[in-house]
Image (cartoon, rainbow, N blue to C red):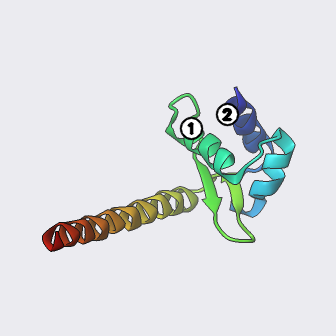
Amino acid sequence: MIEELVYAYLCSHNRGKDNLIKNQDLRNMFEIRSDKSMRQVIQNIRESMQFTEVVGSVSGTHGGFYICETEEEMKETVNNIKHRANQMLRMTHVLEYKISKCKEVE
């Protein structure tokens, strides 16, 4: 299972935000072809109770993945995920509003 391999690697080599590994480097190491596939592997690790450590991430050109070492890193990871979830929820409200306006025109 690729998640077990990626998780084990992160746990032994990338502990703490200062030791993150770039998405591309991790993908190359495990021959994961796409960014989307790598994000899915990380999501699977995060969602599984089998993997007890928290995988943090930093977005952008200097970003990557790491195992959270401090409470601050864990809180930052949770807050980043909540922020993205809230953005998606707001988008659904906008889309639902647009759909309702389209139906009024018909």
Q: Percent from the top left, x then y, of residue 79?
A: 45, 63
Badge number at residue 44: 1
Question: Measured along the vertical axis of the image, is residue 75 above or below residue 48?
Answer: below
Q: Looking at the image, can residue 21 be seen? A: no
Q: Residues within 10 Å of mark 1 (few under 14, many from 20)?
A: few
Q: Which residue is drawn at 62% across and 44% down?
A: 42
Q: Residue at x 36, y 64 (%)?
A: 86
Residue situated in front as seen by the camera: 43 or 95: 95
Quadrant (top left/top right/bottom left/bottom right) for the C terminus: bottom left
Q: Percent from the top left, x then y, of residue 51?
A: 59, 33
Quadrant (top left/top right/bottom left/bottom right) for the N terminus: top right
Amino acid at circle 2: Glu
Give the CA distance from mark 1 to mark 2.
7 Å
- Left/right placement of residue 75 relative to residue 18 reads left
Dot 2: element: helix
- Left/right placement of residue 11 relative to residue 104 reads right
Dot 1: element: helix
Question: Measured along the vertical axis of the image, is residue 7 above or below residue 76?
Answer: above
Q: Which residue is drawn at 43% across and 66% down?
A: 83
Residue situated in front as seen by the camera: 30 or 5: 30
Q: For residue 7, what is the image quadrant?
A: top right
Q: Of the residues under marks 1 and 2, which one precedes in the sequence? A: 2
Amino acid at circle 1: Asn
Q: For residue 91, what is the image quadrant?
A: bottom left
Badge number at residue 5: none
- Left/right placement of residue 81 relative to residue 90 reads right
Q: Are marks 1 and 2 in contact (CB under 8 Å)?
A: yes
Badge number at residue 3: 2
Q: Percent from the top left, x then y, of residue 69?
A: 64, 52
